[in-house]
Amino acid sequence: MTIEILKSTARLDDTEGKERFLATIGSDVEGLRAQLKPGAMIHIEQYEKETLTARYLKTDGVSYICFIVIGVSLEDARRIALASRETPGWSTADFRKSVGKALGVVMPPAILD
């Protein structure tokens, strides 16, 4: 199976941007909406077994970034979570390196960051 990595990011005060992102979440939308507010400092990892999709979300009080990894097992998602926690940066390149490290593969560079 091919692994796909997507990224969503917006300012925490950008209601439209957050709502577009939340429309892609399958579960606990209301709980996440309540947490994505200006000043929030959170780190959330979520896995959807039905779609083999893992989400890794982090906020810095001003904005959020969420990497969505499609096509991974629960075990792979756990390995990615551990590797991403050990990575100091949350850039697209850093996250892709974490995925590669966790899965033992070389991830090609992202087309756009």
Image: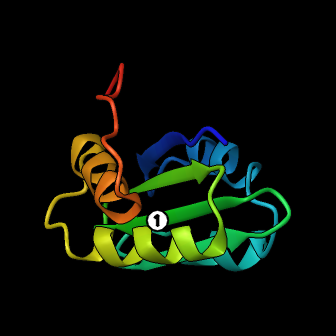
Side (left or right) of 89 relative to 39: left
Residue at image coords 13%, 67%:
88
Q: Secondary structure at mark 1?
A: strand
Amino acid type at image mark 1 = Leu
Picture coordinates of residue 13 (x, y %)?
A: 46, 54
Residue at image coords 42%, 67%:
80
Q: Residue farthest to the right? A: 50
For the residue pair 91 and 82, the one nearer the viewer reads as: 82
Q: Report which quarter residue 75 is drawn in.
A: bottom right
The answer to whether residue 63 shows anywhere in this view is no
Q: Determine whether 10 is above or below 30 in the image.
A: above
Residue at image coords 73%, 59%:
52
Q: How is the image coloured?
A: rainbow
Side (left or right) of 26 relative to 42: right
Q: Determine whether 12 is above or below 15 in the image.
A: below
Side (left or right) of 28 relative to 63: right
Picture coordinates of residue 9 (x, y %)?
A: 44, 45
Q: Residue farthest to the front? A: 104
Residue at image coords 76%, 69%:
29
Crowd around label 1: few <14 · some 14–19 · many ≥20 (10 Å): some
- Looking at the rendering, in which quadrant would you find the C terminus? top left
- Looking at the rendering, in which quadrant would you find the N terminus? top right
Picture coordinates of residue 44 (x, y %)?
A: 49, 77
Side (left or right) of 37 relative to 32: left
Picture coordinates of residue 84 (x, y %)?
A: 31, 68
Q: Which residue is mark 1?
A: 57
Q: Determine whether 100 is above or below 50 in the image.
A: above
